[in-house]
Image: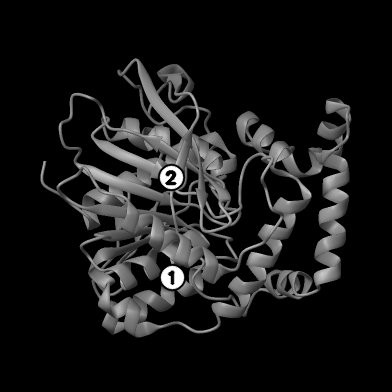
């Protein structure tokens, strides 16, 4: 694939829009480290949900660059978001690439990434990778094509091979949901010289045969005419000329989200978006029917996984299965049980901030680097 960037203007975001207030962590009990046999770090739940943010930020602003990149012979649009390290850092301590879940739209992860950047004192380069054809807005050259999981795996590997890390400690991938599976595949195929390690957030790496909801969703996305019908309905609503009417129509979907994710969702809800999400999801269900234990064994010391209760995409019984496998001793698993945190953590600012803190902890414990 050819990566030819078209750069949008740099946006400067005041730190006050990122984090403000007392430590959310202080409201929660300290993590309890389990005995070696169970190895997971269980995070205590807060007694009540708090509106406090993770931490005060002393830096005046965070620089965020959004780019639209054309890839492949057909120049399919994809999006990338870059948050560079503090200019005073000659070589950042960490180089992180965030690989979203499906839909692979980087903008949904911006608040999480900015919080993580500030929690790490700006000593990190962060890029948020975008899936091929998955974009916040429709561009004039959007083809309407949809892409399989294999297409996106190839796309991620080409992207990683095309970039150069400024950190002397290499690149760590932070993958959410199916992004965790994509990150593990990239680490396995490209090796440690390109991918130093993987942090998987609520990892969708295996179909959950115990979930009736997942079986139902799998059946739906395998009915192509139904997918196209739903996409057409969403496209019709999204094209309504009256913003208030569109907001009302989509309110059952966006009602509980934070303001920025809700706005992004209304922009993203289009016919081509629905087809891309659903039909890629079909190929995910088809591909993730068995666990490649040899791959996990090869990379157990470079992999850490974070789970939350009630998540059918990354169920706790799978986490427990990993913990019972003797050949995977050394792979860290963590359970985040704070109220309100779920699989779609990026849609709620407080949850995104808390998961950013947990990501920092996993990086420091499982992927330590020289200062």
Residue tagged 1: 319
Residue 355 horizontal/vertical position (percent): 43, 45
Q: Secondary structure at mark 2?
A: helix
Of residue 223 and residue 363, the one placed in the foreground of this image is 223
Residue 76 horizontal/vertical position (percent): 58, 52
Q: Quadrant of the N terminus?
A: bottom left
Residue tagged 2: 355
Quarter holding residue 299:
bottom left
Is 170 situated above or below 315?
above
Q: Quadrant of the C terminus?
A: top left
Query: What residue is drawn where x is 76% and y is 46%?
Result: 270
Kindly tell me whether residue 27 is visible in this rendering. Answer: no
Quarter holding residue 91:
top left
**278 to the left or right of 45:** right
Is 158 situated above or below 150?
above
Of residue 237 and residue 371, the one placed in the foreground of this image is 237
Q: Secondary structure at mark 1?
A: helix
Sequence order check, earlier mark of 2 and 1: 1
Marks 1 and 2: in contact by CB < 8 Å?
Answer: no
Residue 286 horizontal/vertical position (percent): 61, 79
Of residue 28 and residue 302, the one placed in the foreground of this image is 302
**120 to the left or right of 291:** left
């Amino acid at each position: 694939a050819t990566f030819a960037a078209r750069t949008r203007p740099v946006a400067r975001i005041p730190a006050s829009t990122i984090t403000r207030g007392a430590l959310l962590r202080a409201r929660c009990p300290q993590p309890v480290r389990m005995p070696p046999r169970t190895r997971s770090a269980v995070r205590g739940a807060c007694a009540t949900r708090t509106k406090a943010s993770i931490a005060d930020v002393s830096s005046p602003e965070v620089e965020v660059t959004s780019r639209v990149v054309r890839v492949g012979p057909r120049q399919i649009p994809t999006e990338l978001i870059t948050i560079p390290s503090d200019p005073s850092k000659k070589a950042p301590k960490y180089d992180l690439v965030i690989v979203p879940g499906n839909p692979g739209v980087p903008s949904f992860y911006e608040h999480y990434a900015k919080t993580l950047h500030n929690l790490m004192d700006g000593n990190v380069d962060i890029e948020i990778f975008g899936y091929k054809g998955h974009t916040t807005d429709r561009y004039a050259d959007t083809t309407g094509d949809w892409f399989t999981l294999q297409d996106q795996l190839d796309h991620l590997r080409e992207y990683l091979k095309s970039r150069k890390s400024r950190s002397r400690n290499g690149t760590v991938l932070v993958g959410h949901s199916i992004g965790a599976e994509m990150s593990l595949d990239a680490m396995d195929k490209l090796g440690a010289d390109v991918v130093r390690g993987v942090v998987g957030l609520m990892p969708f790496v295996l179909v959950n045969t115990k979930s009736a909801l997942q079986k139902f969703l799998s059946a739906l996305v395998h009915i192509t005419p139904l997918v196209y019908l739903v996409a057409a309905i969403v496209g019709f609503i999204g094209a309504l000329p009256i913003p208030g009417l569109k907001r009302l129509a989509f309110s059952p979907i966006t009602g509980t989200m934070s303001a920025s994710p809700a706005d992004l969702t209304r922009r993203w809800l289009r016919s081509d978006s629905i087809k891309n999400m659903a039909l890629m999801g079909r190929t995910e269900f088809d591909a993730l029917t068995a666990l490649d234990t040899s791959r996990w064994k090869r990379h157990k010391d470079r992999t850490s996984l974070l789970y939350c209760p009630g998540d059918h995409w990354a169920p706790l019984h799978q986490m427990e299965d990993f913990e019972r496998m003797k050949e995977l001793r050394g792979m860290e698993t963590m359970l985040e049980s704070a109220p309100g945190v779920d699989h779609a953590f990026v849609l709620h600012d407080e949850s995104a901030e808390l998961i950013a803190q947990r990501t920092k902890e996993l990086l420091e414990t499982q992927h330590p680097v020289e200062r």
